[in-house]
Each structure stands twice: as structure tokens, then as C-alpha cells.
Image (cartoon, grey):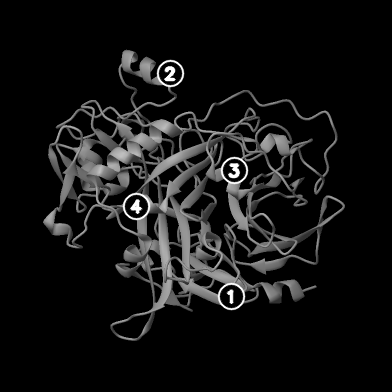
Amino acid sequence: MPSPRIRRAWLTAAAAASLALTGLTAPAQAEDAPQDVTSATVQEPLATETAPAPLATAAWTPGGPASPGDFTLSPGALNAETTARVTRLDSVLPKSGVQNLLIGANRDVSPWCSRDPFGTAPDPDIKYCLQNDDSTSREWVPQGFSGVSDAQDDELWGTAGNIQLFASYDGWDPGREDDPDPATGDCTAAETEANDACNQKGVRITFVQSRVNPASGISEIKYRHVLLGWTYVNSADHVSFDGLHASEYPIQKGVHAGGIVWYGNYLYVADTRNGLRVFDMRTIMDLDPDGDPGTHDAMGSDTDGVKTTANTEDKTKVGRHDNVWYSFGYRYVMPQVAAWKFKAGQGNPAGSYGCVPTGAPKASYISLDRSTTPDRLIMGEYCRPQSGAESTGRIASYPVADLEQRSLDVTAQGWANYLPLAGGGAQGAAAHDGTLYVNESKGTDEPGNLWRYTWNDGQLVTSGQAVKTARGAEDLYVERGTGRLWSLSEHRPGSDPDCKANPDASDPDGTDYCQRVLYAHKLSRLDARP
């Protein structure tokens, strides 16, 4: 699932030097002028590319203990400044609560459609199919998974239940570095206006809810996308926001969102080479409060008292331009409120799927374990060991409540291990009642593996045989009330030769297993398997 890197022009040397002292560079955006596609966008925490750390001299073994200290997270250097910017943005843009967002959910889920990414694997307990444009989108690639069972002990958000969340990153920019012709390697202004996919939008979160429609009394499953953003102050001293410009390997300035955890008011998003980004459910901004995109609703004013409006019809712009707010066409935007950054140096080599056994890990996926005391956030690495002593990937747990304070370092506690998964490829992991469940993706040509591990004298050991699951299996989420282990598949038609873009008469269903679904296995059935 490669995606192109983003070419961006830097600000003037003087401005860049000044902002470099804080670790942040704001997009070059003159007031009363649209932001150009070449304007710079570097977000905190900026990945610091270091030389690969030497391999550990001490022996390590798959399943054996790893160093908790390597997982230590430090509060983002700009957390206080970020809070101030979000407060300013909150004074300008109206907010929406999660329940109101769900009431206005505008997209439909089809349960038990014909799409079948499982093949010969056991059928899941439940399967949701996204709308066709999301199921086959070349632009948005689903990854992380969480829900209200993570968020609240009673599994309710106010009076709303049955809520799942998943994250997707923008993995496609036509006309950019995936264009083989150097002369047309970047989107021109005309191309950007004509094709909103030319804009690298970053990451979005999708809220899904199964419910009974109060008006019709009919059961339905609805969902809504929310754009994630980060705030900055532009050249006119106005607060603005941009997307979390995502990129696939090598992860540099982007966010892959391979794992998410919703805990209380906060949403934690895995930032592969950096650590975690934090968002607040209480600051979801609504750029179309009357629900009619054509009215361009009035917004508030920033420090200068100038009134603004919002435009959710134009999908090619983001942030404030000429006193108008844009959001790549999304009604809702959730700005980043804080960050956590690995304290140790990043020894994993840039541009590689391999992992080394020491230094900062990759934050490839995260999940929540509410079956322990205290509740723990789980973080693990996606790796493809290639030779020698390269690591199978590490996984560890943190007391999640420690992440709610943002002044002291947080170190992994409880356990830290190397995965026993010899071939790597872990896309998600979740722990519940002493069992660690790990999703291993095997590509588009065969179902993935769902592994089960337990701890024995501090060692992770395999429990039973791998359970076959979906092709392109991703992050994992435990829904305690229903006893389900949720995940989602990421492949789409055309993403691989095995995923036919245009099924022919001899194989009319050739793309079914490459269309995305949300699905869940019953934990009781998994645990009963040999």
C-alpha cells in the first residue's frame, strides 16, 4: 500500500529559522490568497531521522522480554502552544458533539453484502460493508479501529451505544510522484482545481453506529467521516488548520493512523515514527451547522473581529482563505490537541519495513485492554524481518491514564515483549483476559492469520493454531459487551494483480474479496479453537 511522498516548498529562510526553534513550520499562506499546493506543511511532532542504531549486543528472542524503556514517551514540546491555538480555533468555529454528529450521519452500511475477503477462512460473526465509493476508494485506505467500548466502561457515550470508529489515510495523489513523466510529476493548479484527489488530505476518522431510527422505527447502520487536522497561525496572525498530511513508507512527516484508541474524551492516533497524536472529542468543529452546504454558514471572528464564513462544497482547499473556511469538503474537523514523542532515538531504518531490536519502536498499531487494572494502551510494531538479527517487532503496554497528564514522561509498564511472529507482518493487536490477539496480513492472495498468544514466565507463547481471517486484515478492537473482536480489511480492486479492477464474464465476482468490510469474530469461538 505505498503512497507518494509530498513535495512542499519551504517558507523564507528567516521565517523557517524562527519557527525551527519550536520544531514547527506553518504552511506559507498569505491572507486573501489561496494556499498553493506547494506550500510547506510540517507538523509537530516532526520525525527526526537518525542513523540506524546498532543492533543490540545482548541476545533477544522472539516472544522474549523487550526493554520497556525503549517505549518511553515524552510530552510534545508544543503541547501548550497547541492548546492555545485550539482554544483560538474554538472561539471562531462552532462545535458538534459526538451524538449530534451521529444523528446526522449521512452514509449507509450494508450488513452481510456479497463482498467476501475471507475466502476459505471461517465466516465472521458479523460483517459490515461500506458504501461502494469507500469500499473501492483509491484515495482513502482504512487502518486503525476503536469504539465506545474503549471509550467508556459502560460502553455508552451519553445515551448512544453501538459505536465503532476507524481511521483511514490518504494514500493517493495523482500527478505527483507516482506519475512516471517528470514533466508532469506535480499537480498543476488547474489539475488541483479539477481533481480534489490532487490534495493530500492526511487522515480521517469514521464514526459508525447501528441504531433504531427514532422516526421510522427501522434498524439501520449509518456512518460519517471527520477530517483530522492540526492548527497553526498564518502570516496574517490568524489561527488556521491543515490536514495531517500522510505518507506511506518511509514515514517522514505523515501519519499512517495504523491504530487508534478512543479513551474518555481523547482519541489517540498512532504516529509511526514519532509516537502518538492526541485529539479531543469535545473539539469537533462543525463547518456546516445548518446541514445545508449551499448556504455557506457564518462562522465567528479571530482576534481582529473580522467575521468569516465556511465553504464545505469546495474539496480543493483547507483552512482559512480570504476569510472563508475550507475543509476539503468535510463538514467536521477534529484538530490535534497534543502529542507524545518517543524519548529514545529512532533506530528503525527509514524506507524499510524491517525493525531493529533496540531504540524507539514504531507505533504501527495501538489498542486498549480494559480487562486489566489499570486500563492499558497496547502499542506494537509492523515489521518484515529480512536478515540477521532484525527484530520480529516489539509490543508493550502503558497505563493509559498516565497519558492524560502531559507534563511527565510515560514508560511502558506491565509487560514488553518481542512478538513470536517469525515472519512479521503484524497489522494489529489487542489483549483481553490474558490473551494477546495479533492480526497478520498475508497480502491479497490468501486470507490473513489471527494469532493467539499468552504469557508464560514473562514470555509470549503461541496458543493454538492461527485462525484464518480476512485478506488485508488490519487493526483490532475488543467490544466487551458483545464479546466481539473487530477488525477491517484494507484492499480494494486494482490494488494488486490479484484484485481485478474490472471483473470479466468468466470471473464476475473477482473483486469481491478486495472490497473493504468491517467485521468481528466472537471471542468465545476463537478461544475454543485448537
Which percent across, then down, holds residue 20?
Answer: 42, 20
Q: Residue furthest bottom?
A: 217
| Mark positioned earlier in the residue sequence (3 or 1) | 3
Circle on res. 482: 1
Which percent across, then down, holds residue 51?
Answer: 63, 23
User: How far apart are labels 1 and 4 at the CA level?
Assistant: 28 Å
The reply to whether discs 3 and 4 touch (Cβ–Cβ < 8 Å) is no
Q: Dot 3 corresponds to which residue? A: 363
Element on which disc 1 rests: loop
User: How far apart are labels 2 and 4 at the CA level?
Assistant: 30 Å
Say what amino acid the circle numbered 2 marks. Leu
Q: Dot 4 corresponds to which residue? A: 284
- Based on the displayed image, in which of its 4 quarters is residue 303 positioned? top left
Mark 2 vs mark 3: give the one in front: 2
| Mark positioned earlier in the residue sequence (3 or 4) | 4
Q: Decide: is 519 above or below 361.
A: below
Say what amino acid the circle numbered 1 marks. Thr
| Mark positioned earlier in the residue sequence (1 or 2) | 2
The reply to whether discs 2 and 3 touch (Cβ–Cβ < 8 Å) is no
